[in-house]
Image (cartoon, helix red, strand yellow):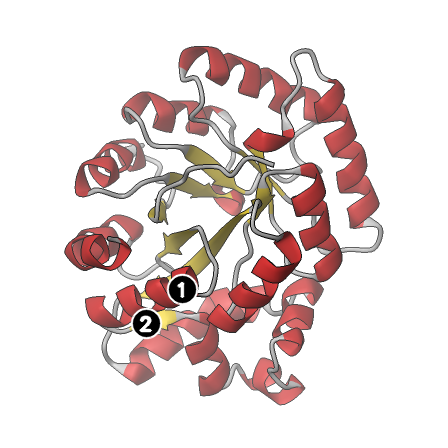
Amino acid sequence: MTKIDFGPVGVALNVSDDDSYVAEAAELETLGYSSVWLPGGELDSLERLADLLAATRTVPVAPAIIPPDVYADDAVAAVYARLERTHPGRFIVGLGSPHRPRQLRALNDYLDRLDAADPPVPAERRILAALGPRNLELARDRAAGAVPLLVTPGYTAWAREILGAESTLVVYQLAVADTDPHRARRTAREPTLRGLLGVGGYADNARRMGFSDQDIAELSDRLVDGLIGWGDETAIAGRVQDHLNSGADHVVLGDDDQPGAIEVARQLAPRLAKTAG
């Protein structure tokens, strides 16, 4: 499978009611970020992706992720076909199923329907949310690669081994731009980590990475420090570089709601330009 060229570092923007995130996407491109993403939980309309493509010139735009139980395959295929005509080569279809029994089979079936669409959504333009080995194998075999969330650099190296050298590995790294350890960890814990680790797949993956049930239940400092990039520009850029050194092709920064994705991006841009280079 041909890798997707996302470049080194992108940013996931928070959707705003006033559509200011569209202007922020253009600013991200100017700042030197190499992709723009929208979190799946904020994707209330696929048209938001079209807006980001129209606001930017060359960078790839992707959702992380489109939930198949919310958007039917024919709707996704239609949007892909339209955006491929208007912005060829720039729209990447990020997909992922809920953490529940038989979700792998359901996602496989969904991918079958995307393959059969007219025109199809090709595997090389799809990327899958994946954590466990079976999901990573599916991402390797039926998409261009995987985008895991809440992972350590050690996990990144492990995922690269499963995906192989030819698949794209994008790490979605939550970041808190705060040098006060107590405040930064508190920001990370509530509500983000508390909510995500209440979902079976994320908790299972935390155990896979060596965190204990107590770490997960208490959202221990060890767990927060392992999963969240926090601190000043140097510290967060260092976490990005750790993932790149461990086998990631691309790192997407999410801001964990403090102080806002665009503010974090502005702070980090000079340092990340040096890191990624």
Residue on which the image places disc 1:
245
Q: Is residue 271 above or below residue 185?
A: above
* Residue drawn where x is 24% and y is 81% of the image: 180
Q: Nearer the viewer, mark 1 or mark 2?
A: 1
Report x, y in % for residue 213. Answer: 66, 85
Q: CA distance from mark 1 to mark 2?
A: 19 Å
* Residue drawn where x is 63% and y is 66% of the image: 202
Q: Which three-letter amino acid code belongs to the residue tagged 2?
A: Trp
Report x, y in % for residue 244. Answer: 40, 60
Question: As drawn, is 87 to the left or to the right of 74?
Answer: left
Q: Secondary structure at mark 2?
A: strand
Query: Could you say which is closer to the camera, residue 245 or residue 58?
Result: 245
Q: Which three-letter amino acid code belongs to the residue tagged 1?
A: Asn
Question: As drawn, is 230 to the left or to the right of 111?
Answer: left
Query: Could you say which is closer to the camera, residue 90 or residue 74?
Result: 90
Residue on which the image places disc 2:
230
Report x, y in % for residue 211. Answer: 60, 82
Report x, y in % for residue 168. Answer: 53, 45
